[in-house]
Amino acid sequence: MTTAPAERVVDALIGAHLVDPSTRAESLSVVLDALDGRARPTGTGRRALPQLVEVVAYLGGALVLAAGALFLFEQWGELGFGARVAWLAVSTVVLLVAGFVAAQVPGDGPGLREPANDVRRRLAGSLLTFGGLGAAILVGHLVDHATTDDLSAVYWPGVIGALVGVLVGAIGYRVAPTAVGLVGTITGAITATMTLVDGVDRFEGDAAGVALFLLGVLGLALTELHWFRESTVARSLGVTVALVGAQVPVMDGTHSWLGYLLTLVVVVAGIALYLSRLAWPYLAVAVIGVTLLVPEVVADWTGGSLGAVGGVLVAGITLLAASFAGYRLRAEATD
């Protein structure tokens, strides 16, 4: 059965703001079940079996990985360079090969991104993500062994290893998109960014904050260009990284005004994007950003003269006002 009619129905519901765009895959599965119930088993027992298989596979894989990591951690100091590289290389290759094999779907069946293959997709994505982590550690160890220049301020094994992890993770995500893959890729990008910034700029707080802010903005731009299947997860990660980056200069205290400005940008952009996309992470980051920004600015302008009680009162009033404003925005956007 072709999925084109069901996709048109779901897209029409999304266009009418009756369905959240982030739940498109699940909504498509429900519509397909309703249109073609005979081809799609609905019994709870038959549905539970693939889920049980998935859970058992995850547990088995996690135990194997944990055993390997524990052994490597305990024996790392006693192993030679060749043994370490061999262990890391074999583990990485096994994970990547297993991930690519799990991602292969018979030609006459539904594609890997179809709801019918969710179990296979999640398993393949998890294996490929851990394979990317293994590749990052392996390359980082090789670079660390090859470089002897201790004068460099940048820890290049960390930067290069993390970038390799991002590359492998991105490839794995294109093969089998999962939330785990998104988290692994953004973690590698954050690691590479922070390691690089730590060695190239003495104003670490400001530079790290701006770098994280731009990284979050880049992730959101890619999300809105439909690069990621899990749009809600991608948006949540993007706004979190951007807001944390905006707050780093405030926490560092060197140039608090920069943090205020970046946080204000996050709030304004969050409101604008929520009104145009109706995606809850944008509304959430706007409310949280206002709740953080107003007490910080008031405390800065008053020189902390409000004291603990005044600060808590301002924070509470701001939270209530931001929540009310967020409620009104949601009501107006869904009307």
Image: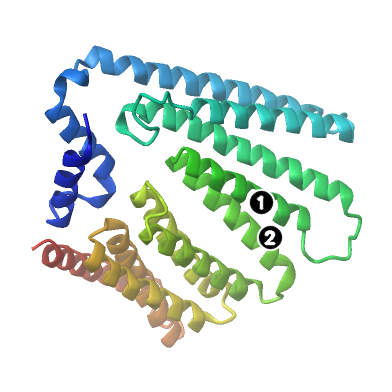
Circle 1 Cα neighbour tier, 10 Å, few/some/many (<14 / 14–19 / ≥20)? many
Q: In which quarter of the image is the C terminus?
A: bottom left
Relative vertical location of residue 326 with respect to residue 91 in this rendering, above or below: below
The dot on residue 144 is none
- Position of residue 124 measured from the top left corner of the image (x, y, whole percent): 49, 31
Q: Please state which amino acid type lies under the numbered disc 1.
A: Ala
- Residue at 21% across, 43% down: 7
Q: Please state which amino acid type lies under the numbered disc 2.
A: Thr
- Position of residue 148 measured from the top left corner of the image (x, y, whole percent): 91, 55
Relative vertical location of residue 180 with respect to residue 160 in this rendering, above or below: above
- Position of residue 75 measured from the top left corner of the image (x, y, whole percent): 81, 27
Read off the residue under disc 2: 195
- Position of residue 283 measured from the top left corner of the image (x, y, whole percent): 27, 63
Q: Which of marks 1 and 2 is in front?
A: 1
Q: How many marks?
A: 2
Read off the residue under disc 1: 162
Is the C-beta separation of discs 1 and 2 under 8 Å? yes
